[in-house]
């Protein structure tokens, strides 16, 4: 149900090159009952899913490293980012999407995943809701090298790290990706590793 205190007055598409960037003009009723008109831009790239693979026996996790242009143009000197496996839903079911992405990116074929929460990652400018998953992995589940899909321009390095090393990398600033930090902290908070 839509909020009756908000009225969309105009939506203008600024770009639909890669994803859709819209400028939305709307009115909002303030606490004192008065109405204010505002304009904001919202980037719609669809919703996504992310997963952290973990191994209880070895106390390890699987992460990826790949080039991320936005980080490069904002001070990440080599543009490489360490992160949990993730992908866009493309109108698919989150669980199916993350299983497919896991196999493509990491080479692990997983059958069971656990959804732990959903979150807006940058709600001031991006519409995306991210579905967060965790799953146990073992060496027997490794069926390919991973690395992503060449036709999607992916060139992904697969990393297996000890859980303690990953926590230390967050402290040192080597892991700066929010979704990854959230999932690593989730494992710690729930005493999974």
Image: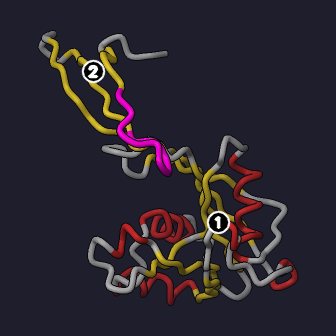
User: Along the line of sight, which residue is nearer the eye, 146 or 185?
Assistant: 146
Q: Which residue is mark 2?
A: 26
In this image, 135 relative to 77: left or right?
Answer: right
Give me the disc on residue 152: 1
Which quadrant is the C terminus positioned in? bottom right
123 vs 13: above or below: below
| Colour scheme in use | secondary structure
Q: Residue 14: within the magenta?
A: yes
Residue depicted at x 61% and y 53%? 88
- State left or right for residue 89 relative to residue 136: left
Q: Residue at x 56, y 84 (%)?
A: 163
**Helix, strand or loop for disc 2:** strand
Mark 1 and mark 2 in contact (Cβ < 8 Å)? no
81 lies above or below 187: below
Q: Main secondary structure of the magenta part?
A: strand
The 10 Å Cα crowd at callout 2, few under 14, some 14 to 19, many 20 or more, is some
Instruction: Report the mark closest to the observer, 2 or 1.
Output: 1
Give the residue displayed 50% in from the left and 84% down from the top.
166
Query: Judging from the image, what secondary structure is the residue with disc 1 in?
Result: helix
């Amino acid at each position: 149900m839509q909020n009756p205190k908000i009225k969309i007055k105009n939506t203008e598409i600024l770009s639909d090159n890669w994803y859709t960037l819209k400028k939305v003009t709307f009115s909002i009723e303030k606490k004192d009952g008065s109405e204010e008109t505002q304009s904001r831009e919202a980037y719609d790239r669809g919703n996504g899913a992310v997963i952290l693979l973990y191994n209880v026996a070895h106390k390890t996790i699987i992460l990826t490293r790949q080039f991320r242009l936005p980080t490069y143009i904002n001070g990440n000197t080599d543009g490489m980012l360490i992160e949990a496996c993730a992908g866009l839903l493309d109108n698919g079911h989150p669980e199916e999407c993350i299983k497919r992405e896991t196999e493509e990116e990491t080479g692990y074929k997983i059958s069971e995943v656990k959804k732990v929460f959903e979150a807006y990652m940058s709600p001031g400018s991006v519409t995306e809701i991210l579905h967060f998953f965790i799953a146990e992995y073992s060496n027997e589940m490794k069926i390919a090298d991973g690395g992503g899909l060449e036709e999607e321009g992916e060139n992904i390095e697969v990393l297996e790290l000890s859980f303690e090393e990953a926590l230390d990398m967050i402290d040192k600033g080597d892991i700066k990706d929010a979704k990854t930090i959230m999932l690593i902290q989730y494992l710690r908070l729930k005493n999974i590793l």
